[in-house]
Amino acid sequence: ADTLGSAAAGQGRYFGTAVAASHLGESDYAATLDREFSSVTPENEMKWDATEPSRGSFTFTSADRIVDHAQSQGMDVRGHTLVWHSQLPSWVSPLGAQDLRTAMNAHINGLMGHYKGEIHSWDVVNEAFQDGGSGARRSSPFQDKLGDGFIEEAFRTARAADPAAKLCYNDYNTDGVNAKSNAVYDMVKDFKSRGVPIDCVGFQSHFNSNSPVPSDYRHNLQRFADLGVDVQITELDIEGSGSAQAADYTKVVEACLAVSRCTGMTVWGVTDKYSWRSGGTPLLFDGDYNAKPAYGAVLSAF
Ligand code: XIL
């Protein structure tokens, strides 16, 4: 295979990228996207601040541009993200508990209703756990006012809103076995034992010298898969360059391929030029859309 998407498809996986609507008009960007990728995740356009900037007023213009583009190319769409402490419009945090619960469910219903039947997987809840050794939930308006049960409630609402979408919990620093991933593991295990609807766990996989590709990555993906959920690599980027970066990308592809329920991976951008790691070079194409050594490594790892 000579593209990322076709190479991954040869192993029954998808290969996706984060996309920004504002770049779709750039011909090299669109050409690289369309040639290489079989799935897209809107980088910011489906977040709460972008889609419901004031209560009850939904705006889907930018997200629709991405979904329309993806559909015209036969690509899947990952929905990102419904309930997250970040990129929240300012009207959400002051709400009292009962009102916040109503607003959270209305937000999920508004997004999932608009895209009903069009989204492969939704990141229903993003980044609900703290870093470090506590295994505790992260403070957020949802956690602080609704308690641990907000996650379960969000998943139940999401299942009813679009029964065809896979429902994922997504987080970072959960790629290896550690206190944070153990806490997510315990939550998923509890959900499966009680019939709370969850289909997949997303591992963001933002790697750099402080947070390298973990040596127990495959083992960690497998233990989640063994709970009866799919696993996906959702926001992959790896700081570095040249052969060292290429070798790290190889490790990631190999880890996913070794886990039959690892259904696909998404890199967090098409080109280094637009990476959220400003000044960094963590992606597969350089700023001129030339394939980097990491690109060749990914292709040959499939
Ligand atoms: C980032 C985007 O890439 C940036 O453009 C934006 O300014 C901030 O958010 N975890 C996530 C993603 O789940 O939504 C974040 O995306 C990166 C970290």
Image (cartoon, rainbow, N blue to C red):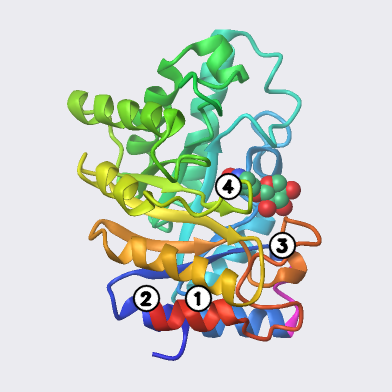
| In this picture, residue 46 sits left or right of residue 169 | right
Q: Which residue is mark 2?
A: 8
Q: Give the Cα distance between marks 3 and 2.
A: 22 Å
User: At 54% across and 43% down in the image, what residue appears?
Assistant: 81
Amino acid found under the numbered disc labelled 1: Phe
Q: SS at mark 3?
A: loop
Q: Give the Cα distance between marks 1 and 2.
A: 9 Å
Q: SS at mark 4?
A: loop
Amino acid found under the numbered disc labelled 2: Ala
Foreground mark, 1 or 2? 2
Circle nearer the N terminus (3, 2): 2
Circle nearer the N terminus (1, 4): 1
Circle nearer the N terminus (1, 2): 2
Foreground mark, 4 or 2? 4
Q: Give the Cα distance between marks 3 and 1.
A: 17 Å
Label 3 packing within 10 angstroms: few (<14), some (14-19), many (20+): some
Look at the numbered disc 1 and say if its residue's Cβ is closer than 8 Å to ligand 1.
no
Number of numbered discs overlaid on the protein picture: 4
Q: Which residue is mark 4?
A: 211
Q: Is 194 rendered above or below residue 295?
A: above
- Residue 37, numbered label: 1
Q: Give the Cα distance between marks 1 and 4.
A: 26 Å
Q: Position of residue 11 (x, y in %)?
A: 28, 75
Label 2 packing within 10 angstroms: few (<14), some (14-19), many (20+): many
User: At 58% across and 81% down in the image, what residue appears?
Assistant: 293
Position of the C terminus by quadrant:
bottom left
